[in-house]
Image (cartoon, grey):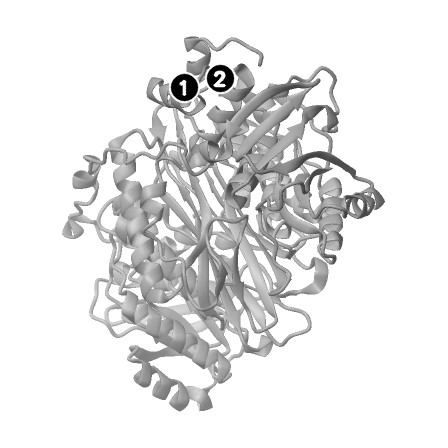
């Protein structure tokens, strides 16, 4: 054993005194420096989930269609008797602040490995991005770097980025959120897991060589940013999508044979995580020889090799006697492939270097037996202030047409084409609904089925009321998928929060988890996996609670798909749901009045479930030509988007009958509303199905003309399409010239 561990060294590794005493008790001796590094990274928040585990157990994770729930590289749900999809969402927030391009790029690479490690071929990706306000040069730099990194990696490897979201708020100054999602298709009998089995089976390293990049990346993701954060660029990994493409094809080819017992991506914590997690899940031990690990730098220490987060690497446990066949496949793809160890029966992760054992730690100590905390919670004091809103004191807006244009030009609402046009969203020709609609739709080749994807969260709602905001995120993600014609089936999530050691943050986190659990239970969309990202704070200032929801839905027939834009002049415009003028927490209140206040709109989950199934039925019966969720900006913004989000914009004439204050009527954000367009002869059937589902329904207008004209009992607005297009089309790009 080597190295002397001092109290200062323990502190540098972010272990508390209590945790270090626990280490001494488990080992029965002092750890050496390599063991300290191994334990500290596996006990970091990023790897151990020590602050969130007890709360995440509240989430529903099972359903007849769930094949694999949380605990593996990705969740898996059934599509039919033969096919399934694997999907997952993860964060790469801290690296993307320090080095936006590589931070985002390696985030894409990591999530893709999670998918093809399951035996699935990735066919689609999404991203959910949060940035600070764009009037600050640093935030524009981060935005441009992140989008470029996502585009570069995804385009090079040939996996389309088909959907996502982006929003902007001051709380993300200095702490952007980069949440990336990927989905792959796999035969139900071809799913692989990350577990080691079979004493004596060889452990094979495949992929890129190991370097010093990314060392302590997981630890960096488990602490706040400080003034010296720029110095942590060495903790950011460097990605190579061309090598990842070779690795993916090599893995998928090897999976075609009966060679692989288990496989794990070397992601956060690198060799340390893959060896310990595979051993723990299989109830075995693993020993490896670091002298056999392919290295691209000279003089690397055991500590550096074990903690390196170099990209594009996998650890495979193969059946004894097949190792040469496995190595042959990866060599054919031009990759390193070396037997570096074997499965043992003692439950230990044992590491050799130059003929000596340099680390020997129980695998369970690093995984299942890592510390778990029930951290103190306290309702944030700020809630009592921000939830108060004197609605009567909000001054009326004189020019509501101008207010609509201001909302359309808000970066949160404006067209995100500048972002998604940088992505190749048609590679592999599976994309049926392109970016820009409520949900993307991806065909599953060889079947009549398709998958719909949506990513959603309104962080402002979660800031004002974490429980309701979390419910709304799930409900809106499901509503968007249902608007496309697919039945919502399951979610993955990425829960982004500040410092969990602050009771106010833990209270918000617990409420968000409770809200997600309630919504997923009612909507029958279980959680198949996800990611928790804590310590999203810079100089003590935290982000809004941001529980990003990635929703997956199944469409029985690809021809059932629906998009959000109006298509035919003369179609009737139908509103599902009721206008109530809820103004608390709205984009209108912030953009026009400069306030983030009030309670977010309530969510009726029983109603939402009926609404989603109604939308699926309407699409299956081919009764609707468009469907668009009413969300940020309210009904007026939703109508404008229906008019201008097509390649051939078309106007609309709408009459609203509710006796509600006009600005609240136009821009309120009450939930559960959808704008449809319907051929006139289909109206009786639509009305019948709405009544059967118990969903309020009214014909509010007609598609056609060159303006969006909306009238109500006391007034009207009429805005030309070209003005709507200019505001919406330049709202983001005006900051990026």
Q: Relative to 395, is 633 on the left or the right? A: right
Quadrant of the image containing the C terminus = top right
- As displayed, is residue 525 above or below residue 697? above
Image point 35% across, 30% down: which residue?
Answer: 499
How many numbered markers are drawn?
A: 2
In space, the residues marked 2 and 1 are separated at their CA atoms by 7 Å
Q: Is residue 122 left or right of residue 660?
A: right
**Which residue lies at the image location 73% right of the left edge and 45% below the top edge?**
247
Q: Residues within 10 Å of mark 2 (few under 14, many from 20)?
A: many
Q: Which residue is mark 1?
A: 24
In the rendered view of the protein, which quadrant contains the N terminus? Answer: top right
Contact (Cβ within 8 Å) of mark 2 with mark 1 = yes
Image mark for residue 31:
2
Q: Upstream in the sequence, badge 2 or badge 1?
A: 1
Specify the quadrant of the image occupied by residue 103: top right
Q: Position of residue 159 (x, y in %)?
A: 67, 53
Say left or right for 506 vs 128: left
| Residue 174: x %, y % from top left | 45, 29
Kind of element beneath mark 1: helix
- Image vertical order of residue 618 relative to residue 314, above or below: below
Decide: is 133 above or below 731. Answer: above
Tell me the element at label 2: loop
Dot 1: few (<14), some (14–19), or many (≥20) neighbours within 10 Å? few
- Rendered residue at 40%/57% (across/down): 61
Query: Left or right of 718: which side holds 648?
Result: right
Residue 339 location (% of width, % of height): 74, 36
- Image coordinates for residue 505, horizontal then vertical, percent: 29, 35
Q: Is residue 320 above or below residue 429?
A: above
């Amino acid at each position: 054993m080597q190295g002397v561990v001092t109290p200062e060294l323990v502190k540098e590794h972010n272990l508390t005194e209590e945790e270090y005493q626990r280490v001494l008790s488990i080992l029965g001796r002092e750890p050496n420096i390599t063991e300290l590094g191994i334990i500290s990274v596996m006990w970091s928040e990023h790897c151990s989930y020590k602050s969130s585990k007890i709360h995440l157990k509240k989430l529903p994770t099972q359903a007849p269609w769930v094949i694999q729930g949380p605990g593996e590289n990705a969740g898996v749900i059934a599509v039919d008797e033969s096919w399934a999809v694997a999907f997952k969402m993860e964060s790469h927030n801290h690296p993307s602040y320090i080095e936006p391009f590589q931070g985002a790029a390696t985030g894409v690479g990591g999530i893709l490995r999670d998918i093809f490690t399951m035996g699935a071929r990735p066919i689609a990706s999404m991203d959910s991005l949060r940035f600070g306000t764009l009037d600050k040069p640093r935030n524009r730099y981060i935005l441009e770097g992140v989008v470029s990194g996502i585009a570069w990696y995804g385009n090079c490897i040939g996996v389309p980025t088909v959907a996502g979201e982006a929003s902007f708020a001051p709380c993300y100054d200095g702490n952007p959120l980069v949440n990336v999602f990927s989905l792959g298709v796999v035969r139900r009998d071809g799913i692989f897991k990350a577990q080691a089995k079979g004493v004596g089976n060889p452990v094979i390293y495949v992929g890129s060589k190991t370097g010093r990049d990314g060392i302590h990346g997981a630890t960096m993701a488990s602490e706040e940013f400080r003034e010296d954060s720029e110095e942590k660029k060495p903790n950011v990994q460097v990605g190579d999508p061309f090598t990842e493409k070779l690795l993916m094809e090599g893995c998928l080819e090897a999976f075609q044979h009966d060679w692989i017992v288990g496989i794990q991506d070397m992601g956060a914590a690198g060799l340390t995580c893959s060896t310990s997690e595979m051993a723990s899940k299989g109830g075995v031990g693993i020993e490896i020889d670091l002298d056999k690990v392919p290295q691209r730098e000279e003089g690397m220490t055991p500590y550096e090799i074990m903690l390196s987060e170099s990209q594009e690497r996998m650890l495979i446990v193969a059946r004894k006697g097949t190792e040469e066949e496995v190595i042959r496949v990866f060599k054919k793809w031009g990759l390193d492939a070396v037997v570096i160890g074997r499965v043992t029966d003692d439950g230990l992760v044992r590491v050799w270097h130059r003929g000596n054992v340099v680390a020997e730690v129980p695998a369970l100590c690093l995984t299942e037996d890592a510390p778990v905390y029930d951290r103190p919670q306290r309702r944030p004091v700020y809630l009592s202030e921000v939830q108060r809103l004197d609605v009567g004191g909000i001054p009326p807006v004189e020019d509501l047409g101008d207010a609509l244009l201001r909302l359309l030009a808000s970066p949160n609402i404006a067209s995100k084409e500048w972002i998604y046009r940088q992505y190749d969203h048609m590679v592999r020709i599976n994309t049926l609904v392109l970016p820009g609609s409520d949900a993307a739709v991806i065909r599953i080749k060889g079947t009549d089925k398709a998958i719909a994807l949506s990513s959603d969260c309104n962080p402002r709602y979660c800031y004002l009321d974490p429980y309701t905001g979390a419910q709304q995120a799930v409900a809106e993600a499901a509503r968007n998928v249902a608007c496309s014609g697919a039945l919502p089936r399951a979610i993955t999530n990425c829960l982004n929060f500040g410092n969990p050691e602050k009771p106010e943050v833990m209270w918000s986190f617990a409420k968000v988890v409770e809200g997600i659990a309630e919504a997923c239970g009612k909507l029958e969309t279980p959680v198949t996996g996800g990611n928790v990202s804590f310590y999203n704070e810079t100089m003590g200032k935290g982000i809004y609670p941001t529980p990003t929801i990635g929703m997956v839905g199944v469409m029985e027939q690809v021809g059932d798909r629906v998009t959000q834009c109006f298509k035919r002049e003369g179609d009737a415009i139908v509103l599902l749901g009721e206008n109530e003028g809820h103004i608390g927490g709205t984009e209108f209140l912030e953009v026009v009045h400069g306030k983030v206040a009030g309670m977010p709109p309530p969510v009726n989950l029983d109603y939402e479930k009926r609404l989603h199934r109604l939308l699926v039925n309407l699409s299956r019966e081919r009764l609707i030509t468009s469907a668009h969720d009413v969300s940020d900006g309210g009904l007026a913004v939703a109508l404008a988007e229906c008019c201008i989000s097509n390649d051939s914009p078309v106007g609309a004439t709408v009459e609203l009958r509710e006796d509600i204050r006009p600005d609240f009527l136009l821009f309120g954000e009450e939930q559960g509303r959808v704008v449809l367009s319907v051929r006139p002869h289909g109206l009786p059937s639509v009305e019948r199905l709405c009544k059967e589902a118990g969903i309020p329904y009214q014909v509010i207008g007609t598609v056609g003309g060159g303006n969006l004209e909306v009238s109500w009992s006391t007034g009207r607005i009429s805005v030309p399409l070209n003005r709507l297009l200019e505001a919406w089309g330049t709202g983001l790009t005006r900051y990026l010239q």
